[in-house]
Amino acid sequence: QPLTVLSPATIANLSCGFDVLGLALSGVGDTLTVSLTTNPGIEISKIEGADLPRETDKNVAGVALKALLEAIPDYTGGVKLQISKGIAPGSGIGSSAASSAGAVWAVNRLLGELFTPAELTQFAMEGERLASGAAHADNVAPALFGGITLVRSSNPLDVVAIPCPDALYAYVLHPEIELKTSDSRKVLKTRISLQDGIRQWGNVGGLVAGFFLEDYGLISRSLEDVIIEPVRSLLIPGFSEMKEAALKSGALGFGISGSGPSVFALCQGADNCQRAGAAISEAFEGIGLSFNTYQGPV
Ligand code: HSE
């Protein structure tokens, strides 16, 4: 019996938490339909909504499923998979992660829950390795655990599920330019100053505490990135105008979603999110590029 799942889009990094923090968005994602087959191997029979390779070794969901099947040596069958992309590749809201996480989650369900979410995260990270050259888990972990996650360590993997404040809303604006994660990782410095490190880990701790305490003021103060954003924001047209508009209109914080080009704002409540979203869109309209937006609860 085939199983169809919606695998969520995710916002990775959350400003200060490069490669460690991420959250899942409700209601937007990739749709995957999987079935178990008696023939061995992985067949990606159809991909809708994006021009992506169907060969197992070149497809993020294919390599993630391969890692899962290799972990069950006595399984002699295979998997058939269809992908309908709701998230544009290169948009910065975890397009590759949604496909690889959704594929392993659905197959695990059909196999009778052989694996834990942490083990599934490990398989889905193989998709991220293919997509970006780095097996980061900050998109696949929230896609598989739901809500907000902290990847305390990726090797060995240690994922902490973080409670999500009730009134937390996200707004995402996706400028229609493609920015590959592999490219926006190449521009990053590999050394940081101790001073920047101190500021950044203060913010990571503050943000995690803010989520636990539902302290929106602390969340807001902690949504700051002194290391990655100054470099990557140069690749995103209108970034500073949008940030100014977001903060003026009452967003808790504003930053780059994952490796961009999407940007995000976190807000307290749907009304604030609506207001901040309108201000961000208006600021971006001045740039003259097309874009699309998403808004909803975390
Ligand atoms: N943490 C990754 C990065 C996320 O910023 O490169 C990519 O979506």
Image (spheres, rainbow, N blue to C red):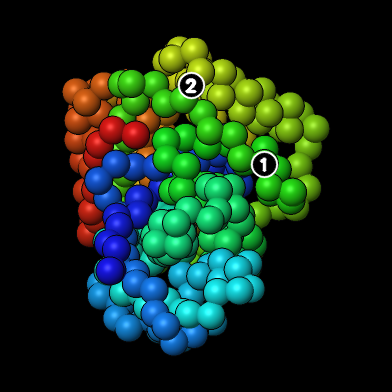
CA distance separating discs 2 and 1? 19 Å
- Rendered view: 230 above or below 179: above
| Residue type, mark 1 in image | Asp
Q: How far from the left and from the top, in percent, is residue 210?
A: 51, 18
Marks 2/1 in contact by CB < 8 Å: the verdict is no
Closer to us: 185 or 118? 118
In the image, which is nearer the foreground, mark 2 or mark 1? 1
Q: Residue placed at 74% from the left, 51% from the top?
A: 155
Label of residue 158 in the image: 1
Residue 131 visible within the image: no
Q: Residue placed at 48% from the left, 21% from the top?
A: 211
- Rendered view: 263 above or below 75: above
Label of residue 133 in the image: none
Number of numbered discs visible in the structure rendering = 2
Q: How far from the left and from the top, in percent, is residue 163?
A: 46, 25
Closer to us: 65 or 241? 65
Closer to us: 270 or 141? 141
Q: Secondary structure at mark 2?
A: helix
The residue identified by callout 2 is 211
Q: Taking 149 as reference, is 238 left or right?
A: left
Instruction: Rate crowding at label 2 as few (under 14), some (14 to 19) or many (20 or more) other CA atoms within 10 Å.
Output: some
Examine the image and state in which quarter residue 291 appears. bottom left
Q: Residue placed at 63% from the left, 67% from the top?
A: 71
Q: Earlier in the sequence, mark 2 or mark 1?
A: 1
- Rendered view: 83 above or below 141: below
Q: Residue placed at 61% from the left, 40% from the top?
A: 159
Q: How far from the left and from the top, in percent, is residue 220?
A: 46, 20
Residue 30 visible within the image: yes
